[in-house]
Amino acid sequence: MTTAGLDHGNASVHPSGKIGPNSLIQTVRAMRRIYGDEKARRILEEGGQGFLWDHHPGEMIDEGEFITLARMLYSNLGVQETLPLLRLSGNLTGEYVLANRIPKFAQRIIKFLPRKLRLKVMLNAIGKNAWTFAGSGKYSFTLSPQLQINLDESIIRHAISKANVPVCSYYTGAFETLLKTLVDAHIQVEEIECAIRGDSRCVFQIKFTR
């Protein structure tokens, strides 16, 4: 476990934003999938987050709860180990949204639209619900000259004060899962700018590989 190239945001933060509980639930699920139950539980307990093991909130949570969990993971596991873990959590969150939040008939209708229109519809839909994952952050997107999603004031900045690589992999995973499923299986999402790395905001580039 390493923390090379990483400064941790240890200042007390009391954000006012609310986000969905899947940020916690799916992160624990991702830990169980990657590490197995025994090690995953040990990581949580050693990081003071053991109560999350069987915690399944049914309502929106304060974004500070996810920030605290992310801070613990980046601090205790290091950036290289935490990035794929949070990306998997984002993938699982996207799968949950597809299974439980977007009606199947709406998903079928979206798939009949031309690809560019599908993308615009989905990016708008994500934006209308951005508060459920962005909290106090600000979501926007552009279709030209670049296809990209923008997050200003990403809440992850409260978990890490500085890193030498983009670290908002939770969002990368969630965006890619939603867009791959409902827009095009050959979409790729990559965070190319990150406020934690020193950029002005977090930018997620959308590419069609075919």
Image: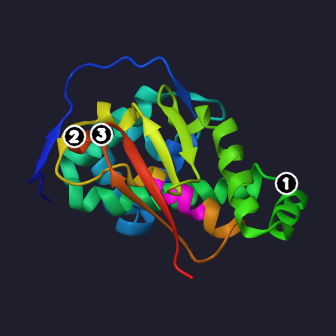
Residue at (31%, 20%) from the top-left corner?
13
Which three-letter amino acid code belongs to the residue tagged 1? Pro
Q: Which mark is residue 195?
A: 3
67 to 14, vertically: above or below: below
Q: In the image, what residue occupies the spot 35% across and 57% down?
A: 40
Q: Nearer the viewer, residue 64 or 34?
A: 64
Q: How did the renderer colour the structure?
A: rainbow
The local secondary structure at tag 2 comes to loop
Does the rendering let one see residue 54? no
Q: CA distance from mark 2 to mark 1?
A: 39 Å
Residue 175 magenta-drawn? yes
Which residue position is annotated with label 2? 198
Spatial CA distance of label 1 from label 3 is 34 Å
Of badges 2 and 1, the one in the foreground is 2
- Start and end of the magenta stretch? 172-177
Residue 48 can be seen in this image: yes
